[in-house]
Image (tube, rainbow, N blue to C red):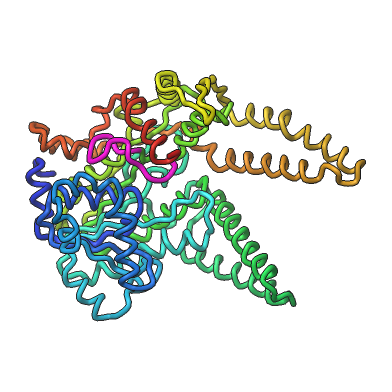
Amino acid sequence: MLDAMDAASIIGYFKGKSILVTGATGFLGKILVEKIMRVQPDVHKIYLLVRASDEPSAKQRVQQEVIDTELFGLLREKHGKGFQQFVEEKVVALAGDIIYDNLGLETLPMLEALAKEIDVIVNIAATTNFYGRYDVSLDVNVMGVKHLCHFARQCANLKMLMHVSTAFVSGFREGLILEKPINPGESLREGTYLDIDAELRLVREVKKELAAMNSSSSDDDDAAHTNKKKTERTAMKELGLQRARHFGWSNTYVFTKAMGEVLLGQLRGDIPVVIMRPSIITSIREDPVPGWMQGTRTIDTLIIGYAKQNLSCFLADLNFVMDVIPGDMVVNAMMAAMVAHSEEKGAQVVYHSTSSLRNPATYNVLYQSGRRHFYENPRVGKDGKVIPTREMYFFPTIARFHLYMIFTYKIPLEILHLVNLLLCGFFSRLYNDLNRKYKFVMHLVDVYGPFAFFKGCFDDMNLERLRLTMAMKTPEDCMFNFDPKTIDWDEYFTRIHIPGVLKYLCK
């Protein structure tokens, strides 16, 4: 049974706490750090683990990539001239990396001192590339969890480990998807058993084979070295996608995040663990900066293409639900969950921070919001003339899109290839450019297509129970709102998210 909470209890929880955050230079990490510092200036310390060669470099990176961003403007105004001193008192940049034992921290005394102080660990660090290198994705999304668990078990005063995953670890199933942990060995394809150690061994073996092949080559100039690196990178990307699909996941990112969750469940011991699984995270809805965002999400490709008018068609069924959730709501849910399950020995709770069940938004809502925004706010070209807003065609199935691509590119490519042969390669550059574009588009469809036609619905009963414990009686309480039912999607997309995409992504 969860205890009742309000803003005062959440704010009070973080007073005097020492918090370790990984992934603080990312979108969600920045929002969390800013929110804690703004609502609870008496937090003891916030340690930010960032990749850097040494402590001064780590400090510089945190300053430039976190503190100096527009996101911290409200906090900057609040503290005035004392802002930088406040930051230096509260924020500690650590040069390290979760892909290494002991988090890559320089000395054992440093690690031991940190372990004595930490009350809460928040793991947001991840490589989110759908088509990333398998070895890199395993290092960050899987082994990173292992190293963090080993460190967490050394923290005598640890009250909570918050791990941010993704709702899409469930794969692209149809129907209601429950908030439940992933069991060891569990995969999405019947008849397969997912052995994490075997996957790690496979990567080592493939890399060893690639190294042996490369060493047999006598070329040792820069071009040959670059080519070897490119070959390894391509091989690791292809291996990740191949292994993900062998076990039933659509891409390397969600596959390795699922493995990370499994490892967390195995290694956590009696540490209280909360796994937060957001769906597609979008721009800030409320505070501190509505519309602020960092990094392009899957749905933003549509907005950017429409804004630039270089996208005449898109792969999506307008009647399908796209599960999206604003970044500030995810952070609010994280903070409430930390308080609710702090010091619950042995607890492992999974939360879906999603919208498809409580307040579904279709692709059509996004498209109509975009049309209205651009008709009301027409773009102006470099010549000062208004750029007309065109309608866009949507392909409701991948099969129809493939057919379109065959007639638009494949058949012309084959004709051009024959002409090219007859004219001794006269059109070779044109042919190669068109072929590259065709392959690139088909690759995008292959990787992103499952998101466009996702038929699942994320159950959020656990998060609903947490919501029901929250008092929403004062403006201060509303600062921790994470109820998707309070979102007017049309208003949010038209007035907040689309302007945010144009300002922060299209610049």
Give whichever of 454, 27 is nearer the camera: 27
The reply, left or right, for residue 376 in relation to residue 47 is right
Q: Quadrant of residue 312?
A: top right
The residue lying toward the viewer, choosing from 257 and 179, is 257
Residue, far front: 383
Can residue 271 be seen from the camera position used here? Answer: no
Look at the picture and state if 190 lies above or below 140: above
Residue located at (53% from left, 58% from top): 133
Q: Is residue 497 magenta?
A: no
Which residue in the rendered view is the most extreme toward the right? 422
Left or right position of 109 against 412: left
Residue 90, given in percent of the width and then of the height, sits at 17, 61
Label tally = 0
- Asked if residue 259 is positioned above or below residue 251 in the image, the reply reads below
Q: Is residue 249 left or right of residue 43?
A: right
Which residue is more in the foreground, 449 or 87? 87
Residue sitting at x 32%, y 32%: 355
Characterize the magenta stretch by its predominant secondary structure: loop
Above or below — where is 39 with respect to 323? below
Q: Position of residue 329 (x, y in %)?
A: 26, 39
Quarter of the figure with the C terminus: top left
The x, y position of residue 309, in whole percent, is 54, 28
Answer with the quarter of the image where residue 118 lies. bottom left
Residue drawn where x is 73% and y is 28% of the image: 407
| Residue interval drawn in magenta | 283-296
Regarding residue 427, the answer to whether it shows in the image is: yes
- Quadrant position of the N terminus in the picture: top left
x then y, percent, for residue 37: 17, 52
Q: Looking at the image, is 345 positioned above or below residue 414? A: below
* Residue depicted at 63% across the width and 62% down the height: 230
In the rendered structure, does residue 287 fall within the stretch colored magenta? yes
